[in-house]
Amino acid sequence: MAFKIYSPAFKNNGLIPKKYTCEGANVSPPLKWRGVPKGAVSFALVVEDPDGLDPKAPKMAWDHWVLYNILGDKRELKEDYGDLPFDSCQGINSWQKIGDGGPCRPAGRHRYVCKFLPLKTIWKLLASLVKKSL
């Protein structure tokens, strides 16, 4: 089975419900995954907007959420996954804040991509990483 991550709250390539944006409750959507590769000890997640601040002239991806040290036996994140267990860590997003910052489109239609990485380790004593550290 191929590795797949998805949200039961909306369709792939569909519109993200307002509840999960800055125009709503700004909570993280539920996420599920399957087809985990053997040997995955933990996972890292990056949710980014590859269109950046302007979809007509993207200069950089905008990081909405950086999350790592998700235990390898987990297969989902519940909605509003803000109260993390001690073995998970949230990194710094493009707003220079720790945690999830939901979509807050400045102009035009944007795409939001979940990059979910199975890892063969759990990082020790690391707090508040940025995406490029993963």
Image (cartoon, helix red, strand yellow):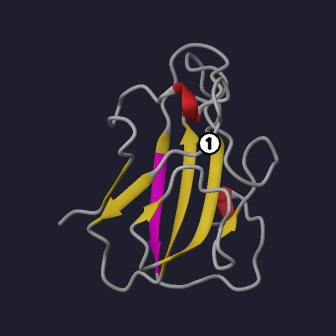
Q: Position of residue 85 (x, y in %)?
A: 65, 74
Measuring 58% from the left and 46% from the top, which residue is drawn there? 28
Write down the residue under mark 1.
Answer: 27
Residue 40 in the image: above or below residue 79: below
Residue 126 in the image: above or below residue 128: below
The amino acid marked with disc number 1 is Val
Q: How many marks?
A: 1
- Between 82 and 120, the residue placed more toward the observer is 82
Query: Residue 83 falls in which quadrant of the image?
Result: bottom right
Q: Position of residue 96 (x, y in %)?
A: 82, 47
Q: Secondary structure at mark 1?
A: loop
Quadrant containing the N terminus is bottom left
- The stretch in magenta equals 114-119
Residue 112 counted in the magenta span:
no
Measuring 46% from the left and 65% from the top, which residue is drawn there? 117
Quadrant containing the C terminus is bottom right
Query: Residue 11 falls in which quadrant of the image?
Result: top left
Residue 115 counted in the magenta span:
yes
Measuring 33% from the left and 37% from the top, which residue is drawn there? 12
| Most frequent secondary structure within the magenta stretch | strand
Residue 21 in the image: above or below residue 72: above
- Between 9 and 120, the residue placed more toward the observer is 9
Using a 10 Å C-alpha cutoff, classify the residue at mark 1 as few (fewer than 14 neighbours), some (14 to 19) or many (20 or more). Answer: some
Q: Position of residue 55 (x, y in %)?
A: 56, 20
Q: Position of residue 54 (x, y in %)?
A: 63, 20
Q: In the rendered view, does 17 fall on the left or right side of 1?
A: right
Q: In the rendered view, does 87 fall on the left or right side of 12?
A: right
Q: Which residue of the protein is positioned furthest toward the left in this rendering?
A: 1
